[in-house]
Amino acid sequence: MDDLTIIDGIGPATSKALEQAGIATMAALAAVDPAAPPVEIPRADWAAWIAEARKRVAEADASNTPEGRSGTAREAPSTGSGTAAETPTVGPQAAAPKLPEEPADQAMGVLVVRGPQAGRRRAGRRFGPEPVRIPVADLTADQVAAIEGDAALVVAREEA
């Protein structure tokens, strides 16, 4: 079972409802027809969830090919599309530590992140109006890009 709560808009209750509907993995979510979701969830953004799941599945598949194998799956940004297929677990528990190809400036500093009053999930974390300080070294490059690229978040970098 994958941690579907890493997808923006899916919290613990929604994840449980998806699991009860038979959607417990990224691959299962990626295979859902957005025009005919199997369960009714208030305020569900099926198209966005499915697109993000497909992106994660495709990237996990790419990391499992001889050309893209890095030994572990990395978290993907939350936009894009791909194909649905069975994959290994993707999520915070499978996120790789810093990989050598990441720019050196990614390993230094701290991100200070504020979200909207209602809260915002990005890169497996929740952000509200109170600032959250995250050492950049604790994040993958994809997670940093997802956080910094989210227009709903106010992000500042500080020197470590």
Image (tube, rainbow, N blue to C red):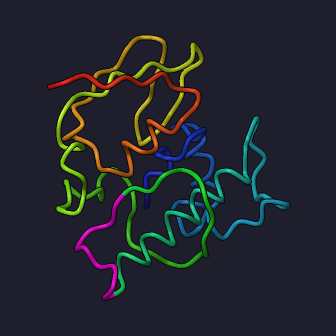
* Residue at 78% over, 46% down: 40
Residue drawn at 40 percent across, 23 percent down: 113
Q: Position of residue 15 (x, y in %)?
A: 55, 46
Q: Is residue 108 left or right of residue 152?
A: left
The correct choice, above or below, for 144 with respect to 74 in the image is above
* Vertical order, 106 against 114 (above or below): below
Q: Position of residue 157 (x, y in %)?
A: 31, 26
- Identity of the residue furthest to the bottom in this view: 66
Question: Image check: 27 left or right of 2?
Answer: right
Looking at the image, how many numbered discs can be counted on the residues?
A: 0
Instruction: Give 136 or 26, whichever is nearer the viewer.
Output: 136
Looking at the rendering, the stretch of residues picked out in magenta corresponds to 66-74
The quarter in which the C terminus is drawn is: top left
Q: Is residue 115 above or below residue 61?
A: above
Residues 160 and 121: in front is 160
Place residue 13 in its image quadrant: top right
Where is residue 69? Give x, y as percent.
29, 79
Q: Residue at x 21, y 40 (%)?
A: 138
Q: Position of residue 117 (x, y in %)?
A: 57, 13
Q: Residue at x 55, y 79 (%)?
A: 85
Left or right of 100, for residue 79: right
Instruction: Indicate the quadrant containing the N terminus: top left, top right, bottom left or bottom right.
Output: bottom left
Magenta part, dominant SS: loop
Asked if residue 132 lies in the magenta stretch, the reply is: no
Which of the 4 quarters of the picture holds residue 50?
Answer: bottom right
82, 38: nearer the viewer:
82
